[in-house]
Amino acid sequence: MIYLDANATTPPDPVVIEAMLPFLTERYGNPSATYAAGRIARKAVENARLQVAGLLAAEASEILFTSGATESINSVLLSAQRLWPDRPLLVISATEHAATLECASRWEAQGGRVKRVSVDRNGLLDLEEFRCALEVGQTALVSMLWANNETGVIQPMEEIVDLAHSAGALVHVDAVQMLGKIPVNVQAVPVDFLSLSGHKMHAPKGVGALFVSRRVAFEPLIVGGGQETDRRSGTENVPGIVALGKAAELAMSVDLGVLDLRQLFEARLLAALPDIHIHGQAAPRLPNTSSIHFPGVDSAGLLIRLDKKGIACSGGSACHTASLHPSHVLEAMGYDAVHAGSTLRFSLSRLTTRLEIEQATPAIIAAVHYLREQQDVGVVG
Ligand code: PLP
C-alpha cells in the first residue's frame, strides 16, 4: 500500500510502539497505586506529560490526557458553556471539524448562540467578519481549527487570539493537524485551550491531550475517581499516554522533507494534468496536504480505482466517516457540490518516501486519464 491519508490517521512510529510495549505487558501497574508497580506507571505518565508540555512550550500542569481530540474538544466546549452562562455566544469558523460543529449544535440546543464566520476562496478566515462577530461581554469562547484537515490551510492564529482576547473571549484551538508539521508555542500564541490527538502524530488511536492554560478555569466533562488532578477521571491509558509522550518528543524536530515530497507530488501532477486545481494554494498551508480538484472526474470512482492500485487517499469530505457527502469546507470556500465531488485529499507524513511519491503520481495520472476516457466513451455512446 502507498499510504497518502495521513490526515485521517498516521502510521504508528516503530520507536513509539517500542516505548509503549512494556506498559502493555510487564509494567501494568495502576498509576494511582502507591506500591512500586504503581509508581513506575505514575512516573511514565508524568514523563509523558513533560514531553507533551515540551512540544507546546506549556507547563506540565497544563496538560490533561484524554481519549483523543474529540473528547478534548467536547470537554472545552461543555466546560465553557457551564462556567459562563452569562456569556451565551460561541464563535467558530464555517470550516471546523465535525467534533466542533457537533458541539456547536449542542451549544445551541442548550440555549446558547453560535456564529459561524466565513472563509475566503483560499479557506482563510474573514478577519473583519470575525472581529464584528465578537460581542464584548457576550462571547464565552472562540473555537477554531489552526490548520484545516481537508485543505491544510493554516489560519492566522496570532491575530485571531488577539482579536478574541480584546473582546474578552477565551480561545480554544484544534491543533490536531499542526503538531509534528509546524512548531506550536502557546507562549508565542497565547491560546487558552488546545486539543491534540495521538493518532495524527504517529502514536496509536484512542489517546489525546488537552492543554488548559493555568490562567483559565475548567470544569471536567468526565467525573469519577479524580484522576488528572480531578479534571478527567478514569484510570489512565498508560500505554497510550507513554506512546503520545514519545510521539510528542519526536514531533519536536519538525521534518522538512515532507514539504519537498509534497512539492514533487504536486509538480508531477500539474505537469501531466494542467487543469487540476489545488485548494488553498495562495494561503499558508501544511507541508503535507494537497486537496486537489480533478475537473470532470468523479472522486468516488477515482478513489476506488486508486484503492485497486494500492493507493490510499481520501474523498474531499475527509476523515470523520466513510461517507462521500459534499465537503462543507469546500462549500464554505465557495465551491459547489459538483466541484467537491471531483476532489480528493492526499496527505503525506514524515514516514512517506520519495519512492512512494514516484510510484503514486503516474498511477494517479493514469487513473484520471482512464476515467476521463471512460466518460468520453459514455458521452459518445
Ligand atoms: N480535529 C481534527 C482537525 C481532526 O482531523 C480530527 C480527526 O479526525 C479530530 C479533531 C478528532 O480527533 P480524534 O480522532 O483524536 O478524536
Image (tube, grey):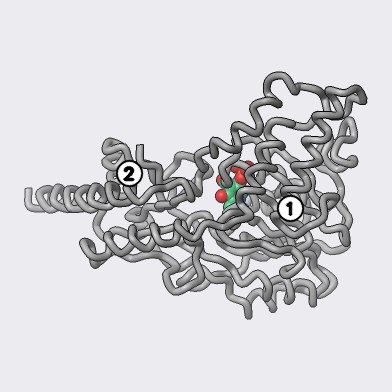
Q: Which residue is drawn at 76% across and 46% down?
A: 75
Looking at the rendered structure, the kind of residue marked 1 is Trp
The answer to whether residue 379 is above or below residue 19 is below
**Dot placed on the residue nearer the N-terminal end, 2 or 1:** 1
Which sits in the foreground, 132 or 221?
Answer: 221
The answer to whether residue 117 is above or below residue 43 is below
Q: Which residue lies furthest to the right in this view?
A: 34
Q: Name the residue under label 1.
A: 107
Looking at the rendered structure, the kind of residue marked 2 is Leu
Which sits in the foreground, 8 or 40?
Answer: 40
Q: Which residue is drawn at 86% across and 35% down?
A: 227
Is residue 21 toward the left or the right of residue 310 in the image?
right
Where does residue 294 sit, x and y in percent of width and height?
A: 29, 58
Q: Which residue lies furthest to the left in this view?
A: 381
User: Which structural element holds mark 2?
Assistant: helix
Q: Tags 2 and 1 in contact by the CB under 8 Å rule?
A: no
Identify the disc placed on residue 370. Answer: none
Tell me if mark 2 has few (under 14), some (14-19) or many (20+) residues whose alpha carbon lies within 10 angstroms of its own.
many
Where does residue 20 sit, x and y in percent of width and height?
A: 66, 31
Q: Residue furthest bottom?
A: 128
Which sits in the foreground, 365 or 58?
Answer: 58
User: Which structural element holds mark 1?
Assistant: helix
Q: Name the residue under label 2.
A: 303
Q: Which residue is drawn at 32% across and 55% down?
A: 342
